[in-house]
Amino acid sequence: MIRFSFLSLFTRRLTILAVIAGLLVFSIPTHGQNVRPPDNAPTSRQHIEVPSPNAELWRPIRNREDADDPDPAVRTPPPRALIQNLWLEVQSGQADIAGTSQVKGVDSAVLINTQGEQWRNFRMEQLPPVGMWLLSVALIGMAVFFAIRGQIKISEGRSGLKIMRFTLTQRTIHWTVAITFVILGITGLILLYGRMALIPVLGANAFSVIALVAKRLHDFIGPVFGIALILQFILFIRGNLPHIRDLKWIAKGGGLFGGHVSSHRYNAGEKGWFWIAMLGGSVVVVTGLILDFPIFDQSRQTMAFTHVLHSLSALAVLTASLGHIYMGTIGTQGTFEIMRTGYCDANWAKEHHDLWYEEMKAEGNVGEVPEKAQQTSAPGAVQNA
C-alpha cells in the first residue's frame, strides 16, 4: 500500500515535468527555421507615426506662423537670423531693451542700452573729424592772415608813456583761467585723438600711462577752471557789455575794411571772445561736473547727451581761443606785455582803443611808470606826464 502511494506520487510529478518541458520546446523556434511575421506587422525599417498634440500646438509658436500654413518649413528663421534681428533692433536705437529687476537704480532694468551704440559711433566716428576740421580751419586761417597781414605794429612807435590797463588781481585770475584752459585743452585732445595719433608712435603701454595722467588732470583741473571762470566774469564784465558802436566795428572787420574804427576799453572782437569764453565755458564746466560726478542717479542716456554737449562746446571754445591767443601774442605788437605787466603803451591805446585812451588822459592816468612799478603793477604807480 505504501509502495503504491509512493509510485503514484512519483508518476504524477514526472508527468508535470514532462508537460512543462514540452511547452518550452514548442515555444522556442527551431535553429535555422524562418519565422514569417504577419503581413500587417511593422518591420524594423518602418517609421511609426505617432500623433503628438503638443507638437502641433507649439509648431506655430516656434515658427511664428499660422497653424494652417501648409508649408511651415519655409518661414522658419534660423538662429543666426534671430540674432541679427535682435542687433538690428539694438542698433536702431529706437528704444532700450528693458526688463524687470529687484536692483534699485535708474538703469537697473535696462538689459541693452540701445542709445549707447549711437553714442559710441558719435564718439569714435563722428566727433574726431568734426574737431579736426574746426582746428585745422582755424590754424590755416591764422597762418594765411599772418602771411598776408603780418604782425600789426604800433604805427607811431612806442611813446614811453604807460597806462594801467589791468590790475594784479585781474591778471592773476586771467592767467589762472588761461593756464587751466590750456591744460584742459591739451588733455582733452589727448583723450580724443590719442588712440589714433599716439598709439602708433608711442605704443599702447606708453599711451596708457599718458592717458591716465591726462584723465586725472582733466578731472581735477576742471573744477578749478570753473571757479576761475566765475571770478573772471565778475572782474571783466565791466566794459564787455554790447554797445551800438560795436556794429560799426563788425561791419569794418575791426579796421581791415574801411579804415580805423573807434572803440572804448574793449572792441567788438574782444567782447565777442569774452562772451564765447563765458557762455561756452559755462557749458563746458557744467557738463564736465556732471561727467565728473556720476553719483546723482544720472541715466546712461543723460551721461551720453552730456558728453556730446561737453565735447562740441569744448571744441568750439578751443577753436575760438586760437584767434584770441594769436592776437594776444604774435598778432598785435605790445599786446602780450599788457597781461604780463598790467600796463599798455599810450600809442597802443590811442590806436586800438582811442575812446578809452581819451578817457584815461582826461583823468590823468597817462604817464611814465618806474621800472619797479611795472614789475609789481601796483595801482597808482603812474606818474602824470
Image: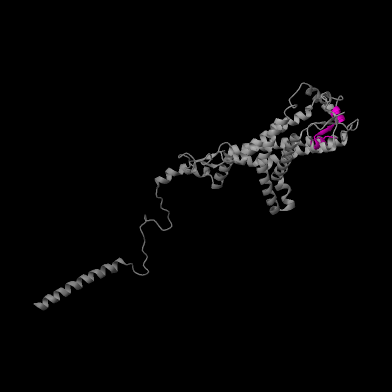
Q: Given the current orientation, which residue lies at the most extreme top position?
A: 244
The residue closer to the viewer here, 225 or 258, is 225
Residue most extreme to the left: 1
Q: Which residue is drawn at 46% across and 44% down?
A: 59
Position of 340 compared to 44: left or right? Answer: right
Q: In the drawing, does residue 19 fall left or right of residue 147?
A: left
Q: Is residue 221 visible?
A: yes
Q: Residue 77's x, y, as percent?
A: 53, 44
Residue for point 14% across, 76% down = 7
In this rendering, is residue 269 above or below 129?
A: above
| Picture quadrant where residue 313 is located | top right
Could you tell me which quadrant the C terminus lies in?
Answer: top right
Confirm whether the magenta stretch covers residue 344: yes
- Which quadrant holds residue 377? top right
Which quadrant is the N terminus positioned in? bottom left
x then y, percent, for residue 156:
91, 30
Q: Nearer the viewer, residue 160 or 122?
A: 160
Q: Does residue 144 show up?
A: no
Give the image location of residue 297, x and y in percent: 55, 38
> Is residue 136 one of those drawn in magenta?
no
Helix, strand or loop for the magenta stretch, by majority: helix
Seen as rendered, the residue at the extreme bottom is 3
Depth check: give the residue in front, 168 or 61. Answer: 168
How many marks overall?
0
Q: In this view, does 333 lie to the left or right of 66?
A: right
Magenta span covers which residues? 334-351
Q: Which of 36 and 15 is in front in this view?
A: 15
Answer with the quarter of the image where residue 381 lies: top right
Determine whether, in the image, residue 220 is placed left or right of residue 247. Answer: left
